[in-house]
Image (cartoon, rainbow, N blue to C red):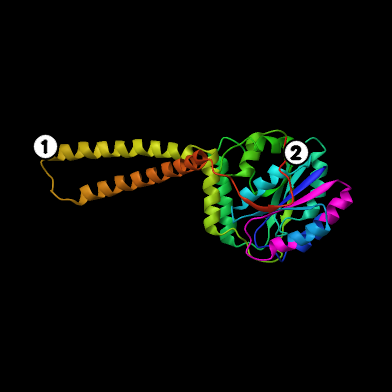
Amino acid sequence: MDISVIIPAYNEEANIQMLYDRLSAVLRQMQLDYELIFVNDGSQDKTIALIKNLSAKVPEVKYIDFSRNFGHQIAVTAGLDRAKGEAIVIIDADLQDPPELIVDMYKKMKEGFEVVYAKRAKRKGESWLKLWTAGAFYKILSNITSISIPVDTGDFRIVDRKIVDILKQMPERNKFLRGQISWVGFNQTFIEYERQERNAGETGYTYRKMLHFALDGITGFSDLPMKIVTYFGFIVSGFAFFVMVYALYSRYIWEDYQPGWTSLMISILFIGGIQMIAIGIIGEYLSRMNHNIRQRPLYIVKDTNMEERVD
């Protein structure tokens, strides 16, 4: 198998046929042996019915149907577990990322790169708030991690089989694949493109999911938040020490003080707030450790026409 295309899908019934038409046209033009792996992530519409209908007519169309919604990154991971291609493409089903770019990405890979990712030069049809929050997240992430995670990129990319084999050895449950792929290393490059508006339907990435995704990226690739808590603890302790010296000096040397509870309450509330923030950050890391320790299946397959790849 030359190339596998992994397509996570959640409530994408309006896009499945057009996506298939464009993908199949591109891959036939490239004259490669290929497979299209649709991963239905617990859709509530006719997404899986349309995919199964395609697979009954076209042997290159494969599907994995989850028992419920497990999330975008887990859907991609399921596709990686079963993909047979020597090159693997990850692309969303909403047609914001053009399938036609796969031709240039594949050519770039043949020049000796193990990873070729698509970098967004422009992003159409997205609100200023989403653009601002995404930009802020990637800038923060690039500054606090020890690896170089490309800015203005998503999961749309082509990777070599050796990269996938390494990813399958990473046991963490809270997946942040673009960070993991950057961490792996090897020769990586990018191609710029103009990201289009969603063809149809509504995005499944709510702001709540985006926040959860951002936390996965930060906690998975940086210990800086916990270090900040430690540093801030020393700062607060130093401040409290000087306040204590000042209070003692006022009481016993100046003998000029007003008994009361205002300063006491402010100090308690301030230190208590810092403690709550610290506990929350530590809790995020412990929660992710707990998910890994439980060793539950990463996902549950309800139905599929694929066999899991045996290396």
Which of the numbered marks, if any, corresponds to residue 160? 2
Q: Secondary structure at mark 2?
A: strand
Q: Position of residue 224 (x, y in %)?
A: 48, 38
Q: Is residue 283 visible?
A: yes
- Dot 2 amino acid type: Asp
Left/right placement of residue 114 relative to residue 270 reads right
Q: Is residue 279 above or below residue 29?
A: above
Left/right placement of residue 247 relative to residue 168 reads left
Is residue 97 a member of the stretch shown in magenta? no
Q: In which quadrant is the C terminus drawn?
A: top right
Q: Secondary structure at mark 1?
A: helix
Q: What is the spatial separation of the Cα atoms under label 1 and label 2, in whole angstroms?
A: 73 Å
Q: Position of residue 233 (x, y in %)?
A: 35, 38
Per the image, the residue denoted by label 1 is 252
Q: Which residues are magenta?
A: 24-50
Question: Who is closer to the viewer here, 235 or 226?
Answer: 226
Left/right placement of residue 149 relative to residue 85 reads left
Q: Is residue 116 above or below residue 203?
A: above
Which of the numbered marks, if any, corresponds to residue 61? none
Mark nearer the N terminus (1 vs 2): 2
Question: Who is closer to the viewer here, 301 or 95?
Answer: 301
Please name the residue shown 76% across and 36% down the image. 113
Question: Who is closer to the viewer here, 148 or 259?
Answer: 148
Tag 1 and tag 2, C-beta contact below 8 Å: no
Q: Nearer the viewer, mark 1 or mark 2?
A: 2
Please name the residue shown 81% across and 54% down the image. 100
Q: Is residue 274 above or below residue 44?
A: above
Q: Position of residue 257 (x, y in %)?
A: 13, 45
Is residue 46 a member of the stretch shown in magenta? yes
- Dot 1 amino acid type: Tyr
Q: Position of residue 43 (x, y in %)?
A: 64, 61
